[in-house]
Amino acid sequence: MIHVTAQSDQVLRDRLDGLASLDKDYWSFRDNSRRAHGHGFFQYPAMMVPQMVEAILDEVGNVHPEIEWITDPFAGSGTILTESMLKGLSFAGRDVNPLAILLCRTKAGPFFSCALSEAKDELFSRITADRRTGVDIDFPGINKWFRDDVQIDLSRIRRAIQREVSASSRRFFWIALAETVRLTSNSRTSTFKLHMRADAEVMTRQIAVTDLFTRILSRNLVDLNSLVDELQQKELMDRGRYKGEVAVALGDSRKPFAPMNGICDVLITSPPYGDNVTTVPYGQFSFLPLQWIDLDDIDPKAKQEYLRTTHEIDSRSLGGSRRINPGTVEELTSRSPTLNRVLRRLQDEPSDRPRRVISFFRDLNECLPQILQTLRAGGLMVWVLGNRRVACRPVPLDRILAELLQHHGATCVATLRRRIHSKRMAPKNSIAKTMSAETILVMRKKN
């Protein structure tokens, strides 16, 4: 359990503020954001800075050395998971995106490095020996998004992966294939949305699919070995498996996470900045890679319906539905005066502007009771938040979330600011043009 004293919040606040007092740009980690230990397996959108998470865990652990379980209800690429493991902590996470769950499950192990290296060599042999020219998958738009020669090469890799006996090895290989798909499709890599390259570029691009996959997989294996070495040096491994517990599930954070009720000590997360369609479209970004992956290797709940359209996953995310029930606005604005002011400023704008703000905060607010239920009394919450703009008007997610949490009895421990230098934001994504800073909001569940 969390041992909270009258001094706990002040001690933690002093420690966090003290780091920034020595270096006002401390929390930005401008010159120290390298993605080692598996953090760079796949270029997922808007990944958190590992060194920032490490520093937060260090300071929280110094004040509360008794913590055991970390949770992240928007787990994404698994940065919180990996950093928790490196501290010897157990982890529980969820995400609505099957690609995120694939990344998290792979990073959780098991880690049989020698067997995986042998499996990699056998995989390459199967790919080289495959001379078939058939394409194993089909979906609306496949010929738009992939050249014929690329489809053939990706199919050979896919067939070779499916013949691998070990599920954990297959997951590791699927990640390398997902990154290969991202780089060889006809969609531009300068945006997270699906935007076609120019026709001339599509036809003239030099794409060596198998060579690219080989390089990515070999690089990822080096990174995996560095993670294994680190865990072994810290005596956190037992016969290829992490000694702590890891629970990862494909699911909606608006719904109960029953197995985790009341056992988590600390939440560290970075939720979406707003509805995915107009900020970071994680689902649209994941649509093409997921077409080539065997969903059965991700999660029993990962069904083909997740790929019905390019927007299906995003429609399941926060703010994905714009249907607003009577009373929703009144309920939200009664809990957050800041949100009330934002909506009043947007009342003369086209109706879709306030509607997408309301729908996002409606869904985020629905997450809070489920999230709080996973935490022990006195548990800490660390929210890394970006404040977007709608119709050129600021939407202060940090203040609105703090007010919504205070409605549930949570108290604010600290508010930190960090400039964004290295968080991966697509240069042509509109959110990147307005998002230059984040807030680290530290709250505590009532004791």
Image (cartoon, grey):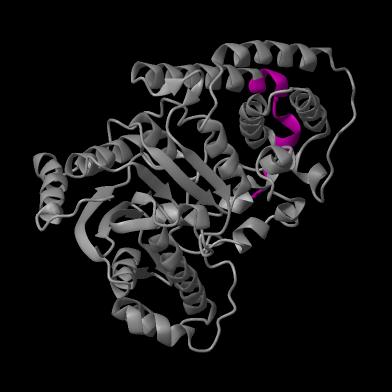
Q: Is residue 174 magenta?
A: no
Horizontal side of 318 relative to 83 (left or right) equals right
| Whether residue 45 is situated above or below residue 400 in the rendered picture | above
**x then y, percent, for residue 27:** 24, 43
User: 151 or 270: which is nearer to us?
Assistant: 270
Tell me what residue is drawn at x 35 percent, y 61 percent.
Answer: 387
- Image quarter of residue 443: bottom left
| Whether residue 177 is situated above or below residue 114 in the rendered picture | below
* Residue 424 visible in rendering: no
**x then y, percent, for residue 383:** 33, 55
**x then y, percent, for residue 133:** 89, 25
Q: Is residue 202 magenta?
A: yes
| Whether residue 156 is situated above or below residue 191 in the rendered picture | above
Tell me what residue is drawn at x 48 percent, y 30 percent.
Answer: 40
- Image quarter of residue 393: bottom left
Horizontal side of 238 relative to 380 (left or right) equals right
Q: Quadrant of the C terminus?
A: bottom left
User: 410 or 346: which is nearer to us?
Assistant: 410
Tell me what residue is drawn at x 78 percent, y 17 percent.
Answer: 127
User: 193 or 128: which is nearer to us?
Assistant: 128
* Residue 183 visible in rendering: yes
What's drawn in magenta, residue-wise?
194-213
User: 236 or 212: which is nearer to us?
Assistant: 236
Horizontal side of 362 relative to 409 (left or right) equals right
**x then y, percent, for residue 91:** 43, 42
Total numbered circles? 0
Horizontal side of 231 relative to 192 (left or right) equals left
